[in-house]
Every structure is written in C-alpha cells, then in structure tokens.
Amino acid sequence: QKGKDKRGVTGVSIDTIKKIGKKITHIPENFNTHPTIRKIFENKKKMFDTGKGFDFATAEQLAFATLLEEGTPVRLSGQDSGRGTFSQRHSVLRDQKNNTYYTPLNNISKKQKKFEVIDSFLSELGVLGFEYGYSLADPNTLVLWEAQFGDFANGAQIVIDQFISSGESKWGRASGLVMLLPHGYEGQGAEHSSARLERYLQLCAKDNMFVANCTTPANLFHLLRRQIVTKYRKPLVLMTPKSLLRHPKVISSKNDLINGQFNPLIDDENIENPEKLVFCSGKFFYDLIDYREKNKIKNVAIVRIEQLFPLPVKSIKKLMDKYNAKDVVWAQEEPRNMGAWGHILM
C-alpha cells in the first residue's frame, strides 16, 4: 500500500463499550422472545461484563452500534439478514405471543441514527444494484448487502463487474458498499457452493476495492468501522465463513476493540526463530494451528493475511526480513484432508 496509513482511528473507549453493551444485550421485561434467543443474549452480556470472549456476531453488532451512536446510519439488506443466515445475528427479535418486533440497535440512545435491516427477496441483481445506488447517494451511511450464501452473489455478478469494481474508474463515483459473503470456502454442493475469492481478486486493480477475510472478531469490528471513519470510500468484499462464527478460538477481548486498528497482516507471536514461514488467510489458519499443536511442530510460523487486496506488500516484506526464514510457503488452496496440512507444515 502506498502513502500514509489508511486504517483510520477505529478504536472506541471502554465506557462506550460498557454503555452500548448494556443496550444491545437488553430485552424488554415483558417481551416474550424465544428461550434460545434469550440464552444467546445472556451469553453476550457475559462478554461485556468480563471483557472477554467477543465473537464474530457480537463484534459486528458492536461495530454497527458504535457507528449509530456516533451519527452514522447503518443499512443492511439480504435474505435472512435480520436473523443472520446461520442464526447468529438476531438483530431483530420477535415476540412469540403477539408477533411484535424489537430491534436492540434502534434502542441505544435518543441521539443515535437509525439501523435499518431488510430481509430482501432472493433477487440479488436487483437488490445489490439498489444498495450500490444507495451507497452512492448517501456516502455517510454504512450500506451492507449480505448474500445468504457466498455463492448467491453469482446472480448479481453484472452489478459487481460493471459497477462495484469499476464505477470509480469509469464515472468517478466512490462507493463504500460492503458485500458480506457468509460461506467463504465452506461449500454445500453445486447450488450452495463457495464464495470464490479469486473471482473478486480478478476484478482488483489500482486500489479499486478491498477484499478481506478476517480471522478475529476485533479485526472485523475495526474493518467495518474503517469503511466510515476514513475520508475515502471503497467497496469492501468480506468473506464471513460459517465455521468461524462459533469457533472456540475465534474470540477477542475488550482491549482489542479499544486499542486496536484493522490489521491487514497478523504476525505469529508464538514461534521464535522459525525455519519455515507459512502465509495463509481465513479459517485455514485455525486448521493449521490445530495441526501444529497436535503434532508439536515448533519451527513453523503461521502468518495471516487478513486483507488480500490491496495486498500489504511492505508488511509482508518486513516479516520475511524479520524471520529470515529458510523456506516460505503460501497456503492458498483448500486442502481436502489433514494430510495436506502436514505437507504444508512439515
């Protein structure tokens, strides 16, 4: 990346986290929500009480909430976006007895802006085209579109090719639209296959958009806030793999939210003087870590590339110089079995 730091100031104070945490985990006393949902909200309260264990869904919700409180409207559309494709978001609650709704993100404070969530029809071309136009008309709103599954973006490919990836170059129109592609590389057959990163990387040139695959809730929090707090607007293609939503190791602390920034590259702090340096992205990191621990491998450092475009070339070069590793491996493909991880790490 050329020039100055483009990450912006995305951290928030501990007082803000505590205040907002109470609001977004609150369910009205006489509201008859489903017992499972109530349990989920109780677990979220524990995150804010202890300052530990923030998961992906809570980090996303906190990013939305802090922006709303700071004066930025947030608009999210997509099929099942209120609940979340994998029943992880629950941004809109329904009373089981009278069918009324309650949206915690619209009950933070009197000064906050509006959170708008739309369970849209499964007609991606029209919906994504509308949201792209919305992002142009109101660059001060965080506009997000979530494909129910990552490959559901297939139906909107014309909008992605002709407008999102190239609109700034062709017409000088900057968009901060966020595309959430929930499945990542976790396919479920021909019709529910994968959101292929390479498709979007093929559209990348001259810093036209961001392509990211976060492995920590804190990085997701800072990345979503970066879309607004910076003085520029770029589309963001964001992989959100299902397996990371409830993975026991995919958690962040309050300090990561307070002090941090979005990190395009995350170093491996657990290995000293490695002989091999492995670069990977996304959920594969946790598979590699598990394999390394089970096989007691102590000479391989695993570095996560969280932003695949623009690629953090300078940071990668610094790491390679720092480690002076004898061997460098790029773990790009999805292994079919754990033996493939062994081939990478051994």
Image (cartoon, grey):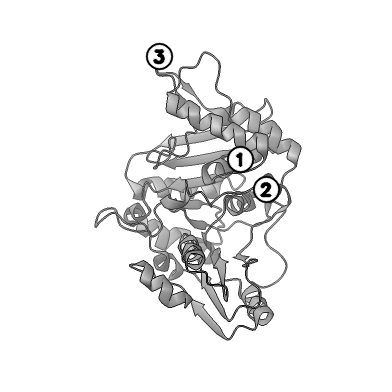
> Which amino acid, mark 3?
Asn
The crowding category of the residue bearing disc 3, from other C-alpha atoms within 10 Å (few below 14, some 14 to 19, many at least 20), is few
Question: What x and y, as percent, mark residue 257?
Answer: 67, 48
Q: Residue at x 39, y 53 (%)?
A: 183
Q: Is residue 272 left or right of residue 34?
A: right
How far apart are labels 3 and 2 at the CA level?
37 Å
> Which amino acid, mark 1?
Leu
**SS at circle 1:** helix
Which quadrant: the N terminus? Answer: bottom right
How far apart are labels 1 and 3 at the CA level?
28 Å
Q: Quadrant of residue 265?
A: bottom right
Of the two numbered discs 1 and 2 on the same chain, state the one appearing first in sequence.
1
Q: Relative to 40, does residue 277 appear above or below in the rendering? A: below
Question: What x and y, as percent, mark residue 133?
Answer: 48, 48
Q: Are marks 1 and 2 in contact (CB under 8 Å)?
A: yes
The crowding category of the residue bearing disc 2, from other C-alpha atoms within 10 Å (few below 14, some 14 to 19, many at least 20), is many
Q: Which mark is residue 62?
A: 1
